[in-house]
């Protein structure tokens, strides 16, 4: 199988690269290294079936070159992270809307199949008990750049669906809910790596708002195999699948758990949203997935616990020293 991964030098993409090479695929990554890093691909550089192309998904000829001859494409390249989106709204919109359109066209021309990475953000402020794929989307003002990520990913899904319906493009969509694990960076607003780093360096853990907002975190080692299986199911074409963790936790409790688990002496400090982001920032109180559609299709059943996730993130940020009482090991599921 010849596979192309856009955004393959990023957090999730680099784990997907390793997973697919282990399965025997020939893998080509197209990435502009904006938030991704070659360092993420350290374990595969030099592999005879691995190829890396530095390029932008906005550049149609670059995308055509890597996609032609591919059997399947995973489209993960995107501007990701609240900080990045709020600070660079225009560039983010271009990447997340026009970039996806370019990829869709190239994949169609190449006759390949496509897996599109979407997000739970598209549900916006819908705080239902568990969000099914048909749930309503409740977004804030179109003038608040905070919502442009959700808006753009929603358009991407609509584009993908229309390419499937009108041109027969073999495309499936996954909606990822707060995926976490080693190589994720806290720089662009991702909460777990940021809090772990603060705990390990003795800084106060900064929790935004009242900290009672809840999320369901899932481990990249559970998500990558599920994405791969969904991409291989012809009944998935034209459909979207939630992929998220099943354990709901408030961000304040998460911070407390991180402090306790890592034996940190850090305090926890509540920071008003206006201080953390621009004025008028809106957060979601709750984000709980209904995973039953993916469970039915590919047996999706995330097993990694939150404690294991925290330990693995910490293990990467603080490689164990000799004599360290806790010798943590980064573990990744391969199948
Ligand atoms: P990431 O930032 O680590 O990965 C994105 C990658 O895309 C990076 O390597 C970056 O350099 C690359 N990229 C960005 N713009 C590009 C462009 N114009 N051309 C080529 N490459 C470009 O983020 P991630 O968390 O690994 O996210 C991967 C995908 O999963 C994204 O589509 C994201 O929207 C989706 N997603 C992630 C999460 C999560 O919790 N991590 C949740 C929902 C959805």
Image (tube, rainbow, N blue to C red):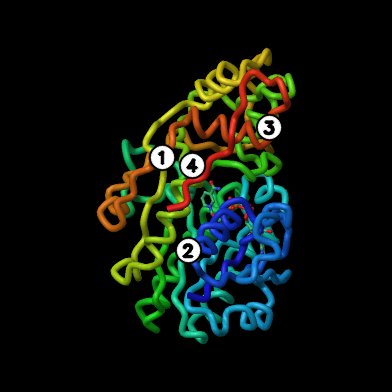
Cα–Cα gap, marks 2 and 4: 20 Å
Residue 319 image position (x, y, % from top left): 70, 33
The dot on residue 276 is 3
Q: Is residue 98 visible?
A: no
In the foreground, 289 or 297: 297
- Dot 2 or dot 4: first in sequence order is 2
- Dot 4 or dot 3: first in sequence order is 4
Q: Which image quadrant is residue 130 in?
A: top left
Label 1, on which residue?
Answer: 245
Residue 325 image position (x, y, % from top left): 64, 18
Cα–Cα gap, marks 1 and 2: 24 Å
Label 4, on which residue?
Answer: 219
Q: Quadrant of ligand 1?
A: bottom right
Question: Disc 1 or disc 4, which is closer to the eye?
Answer: 4
Q: Give the side of residue 164 with respect to residue 15, left or right.
A: left
- The extreme front residue here reads 322
Mark 3 nearby-residue class (10 Å; few <14, some 14–19, many ≥20)? some
- Dot 1 or dot 4: first in sequence order is 4
Question: Disc 1 or disc 2, which is closer to the eye?
Answer: 2
Question: Disc 3 or disc 2, which is closer to the eye?
Answer: 2
**Compared to 101, does 167 lie above or below?**
below
- Dot 1 or dot 2: first in sequence order is 2
C-beta proximity under 8 Å, tags 1 and 4: yes
- Dot 3 or dot 2: first in sequence order is 2
């Amino acid at each position: 199988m010849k596979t192309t991964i856009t955004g393959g030098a990023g957090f999730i993409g680099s784990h997907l690269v390793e997973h697919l090479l282990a399965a025997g695929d020939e893998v080509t990554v197209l990435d502009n290294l904006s938030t991704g890093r070659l360092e993420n691909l350290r374990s595969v550089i030099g592999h005879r079936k691995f190829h890396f192309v530095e390029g932008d998904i906005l550049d149609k000829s670059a995308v055509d070159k890597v996609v032609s001859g591919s059997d399947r494409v995973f489209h993960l390249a995107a501007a990701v992270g609240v900080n990045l989106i709020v600070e660079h709204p225009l560039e983010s919109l271009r990447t997340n809307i026009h970039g996806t359109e370019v990829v869709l066209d190239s994949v169609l021309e190449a006759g390949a199949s496509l897996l599109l990475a979407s997000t739970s953000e598209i549900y916006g402020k819908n705080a239902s008990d568990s969000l099914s794929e048909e749930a309503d989307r409740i977004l804030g003002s179109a003038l608040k750049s905070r919502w442009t990520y959700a808006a753009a990913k929603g358009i991407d899904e609509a584009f993908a669906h229309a390419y499937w319906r009108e041109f027969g493009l073999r495309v499936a969509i996954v909606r990822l809910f707060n995926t976490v694990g080693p190589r994720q960076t806290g720089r662009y607003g991702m909460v777990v790596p940021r809090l772990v780093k603060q705990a390990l360096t003795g800084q106060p853990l900064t929790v935004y708002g009242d900290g009672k907002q809840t999320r369901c975190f899932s481990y990249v080692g559970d998500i990558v195999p599920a994405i791969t299986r969904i991409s291989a199911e012809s009944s998935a074409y034209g459909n979207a699948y939630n992929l998220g963790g099943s354990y709901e936790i408030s961000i304040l409790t998460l911070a407390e758990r991180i402090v306790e688990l890592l034996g940190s002496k850090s305090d926890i400090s509540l920071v008003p949203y206006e201080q953390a982001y621009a004025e008028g920032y809106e957060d979601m109180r709750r984000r709980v997935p209904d995973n039953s559609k993916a469970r039915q299709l590919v047996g999706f059943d995330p097993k990694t616990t939150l404690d294991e996730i925290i330990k693995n993130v910490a293990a990467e940020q603080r490689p164990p020293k000799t004599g360290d009482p806790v010798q943590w090991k980064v573990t990744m599921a391969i199948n």
